[in-house]
Image (spheres, coloured by chain):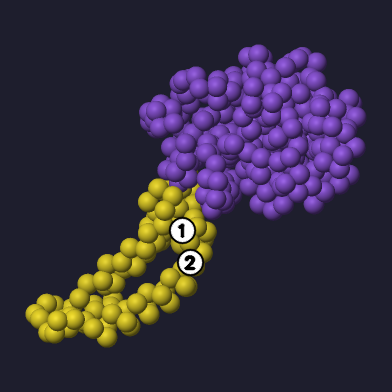
């Protein structure tokens, strides 16, 4: 089973890349898909903490790249989601510790064992970003309905367009506050899509349960945001899942258009 | 002072969400094309100068802007000519 390799990126930091990676990976694992998520944020690792495996790390991504461990030896199996595996980033190195070629080689070795390989990209548009998109088959861009996050997402989309491979990219709009959109004080999903001209794959409401889940190190699939991430996971498998209407606009039309276009 | 400018720009009574959208659309023109408002102005002046060598341009009414069509940038120019002037084409002189 050759895996689909999906990189989760954003440009701006703090918009929810790691949260998205953890929640979508866990959702797919609960749907009996075999999933590995790789933390490519070398020097600032966090995926291990969000998924609650921080005390079980033996080898990390740099150990694999530098040949101290086989990719399979670095896999940490999640206790609550037995189909979910994590390869943590190294914490005491930096982005230059690996190259895009090495990243691709490592991912290629894992492809035959999994259905999905997610790469949690670091913020920025430099080496760490290039490492994270090198092995990708497709890209999910996370943004918030907020001027700086949308501008940075636009930059990422531009860089992906300039990249010769023309990787298919879809957008996750995270931390939407429906009441603020309703009173006109937040960019709506339609506004963001108008500006970025990219396909939407998920609309995630602001939800304090995300913080509570992070505190505990275990994604909460029953929370509002957790359910929205699960919908993203189902859409990734090709299922048509209508968007939960949050606020204004003809967003339902947009997301159905998304599937017919593929 | 700030309020004065906001009122001048019509932003005072506009929701902050619409302001955000407008500001993003403007800044992304520059981001995507690497064409700052100053560079665009300089280019516009040069284009007017070149065209004026051939026809009489109503230079105060010229509009040259970068427009977004999906994710592509288009340089869109409206260049009105002064009425009744002669246009010199490759084939000689004809009436405008």
Q: Are marks 2 and 1 in contact (CB under 8 Å)?
A: yes
Q: Colour of chain A?
A: purple
Quadrant of res B80: bottom left
Give percent across and percent down for residue A190: 43, 37
Q: In the visual, does B79 lie left or right of A186?
A: left
Q: Residue furthest left?
A: B95
Give percent across and percent down for residue A131: 71, 46
Q: Disc 2 and disc 1: Cα gap in Å?
A: 8 Å
Quarter of the image containing the C terminus of chain A? top left
- Let me know if marks 2 and 1 both belong to one chain: yes
Query: Is residue B54 in view?
Result: yes
Quadrant of res A37: top right
- Which label's residue is closer to the chain start, 2 or 1? 1
Count neighbours of disc 1 (C-alpha within 10 A) and say few if under 14, some if 14 to 19, many if 20 or more: some
* Residue positioned 53% across, 29% down in the render: A202
Of all chains, the one bearing label 2 is B
Of all chains, the one bearing label 1 is B
Give percent across and percent down for residue B1: 51, 64
Look at the picture and state if B87 lies above or below A47.
below
Q: Colour of chain B?
A: yellow
Mark number, residue A24: none
Q: Mark 1 — residue?
A: B29
Give percent across and percent down for residue B3: 48, 58
Instruction: For mark 2, give the secondary structure.
Output: loop
Mark number, residue B35: 2
Instruction: For mark 1, give the secondary structure.
Output: helix
* Residue positioned 18% across, 81% down in the render: B90
Quarter of the image containing the N terminus of chain A? top right
* Residue positioned 78% across, 35% down in the render: A46
Look at the picture and state if B88 lies above or below A254.
below
* Residue positioned 76% across, 23% down in the render: A85
């Amino acid at each position: 089973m050759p895996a689909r390799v999906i990189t989760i990126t954003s440009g701006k930091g703090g918009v929810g890349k790691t949260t998205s990676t953890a929640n979508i990976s866990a959702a797919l694992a609960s749907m009996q898909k075999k999933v590995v998520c790789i933390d490519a944020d070398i020097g600032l690792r966090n995926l291990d903490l969000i998924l609650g495996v921080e005390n079980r790390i033996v080898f990390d991504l740099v150990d694999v790249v530098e040949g101290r461990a086989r990719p399979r030896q670095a896999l940490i199996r999640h206790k609550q989601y037995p189909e979910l595996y994590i390869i943590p980033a190294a914490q005491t190195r930096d982005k230059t510790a690996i190259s895009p070629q090495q990243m691709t080689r490592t991912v290629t070795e894992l492809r035959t064992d999994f259905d999905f390989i997610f790469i949690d990209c670091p913020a920025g548009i430099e080496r760490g970003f290039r490492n994270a998109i090198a092995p990708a088959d497709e890209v999910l861009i996370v943004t918030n309905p907020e001027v700086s996050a949308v501008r940075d997402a636009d930059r990422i989309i531009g860089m992906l367009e300039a990249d010769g491979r023309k990787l298919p990219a879809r957008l996750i709009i995270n931390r939407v506050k429906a009441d603020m959109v309703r009173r006109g004080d937040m960019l709506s999903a339609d506004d963001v899509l108008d500006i970025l001209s990219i396909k939407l794959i998920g609309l995630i409401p602001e939800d304090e349960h995300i913080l509570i889940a992070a505190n505990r190190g275990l994604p909460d699939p029953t929370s509002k945001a957790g359910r929205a991430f699960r919908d993203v996971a189902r859409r990734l498998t090709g299922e048509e899942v209508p968007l939960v209407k949050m606020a204004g606009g003809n967003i339902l039309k947009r997301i159905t258009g998304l599937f017919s276009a593929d | 002072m700030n309020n004065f400018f906001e009122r001048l720009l019509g932003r005072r009574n506009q929701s902050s969400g619409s302001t955000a959208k407008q500001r993003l659309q403007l800044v992304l023109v520059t981001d995507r094309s690497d064409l700052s408002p100053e560079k665009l102005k300089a280019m516009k002046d040069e284009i007017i100068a070149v065209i004026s060598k051939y026809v009489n341009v109503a230079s105060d009414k010229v509009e040259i802007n970068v427009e977004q069509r999906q994710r592509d940038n288009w340089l869109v120019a409206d260049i009105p000519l002064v009425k009744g002037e002669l246009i010199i084409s490759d084939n000689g002189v004809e009436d405008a």
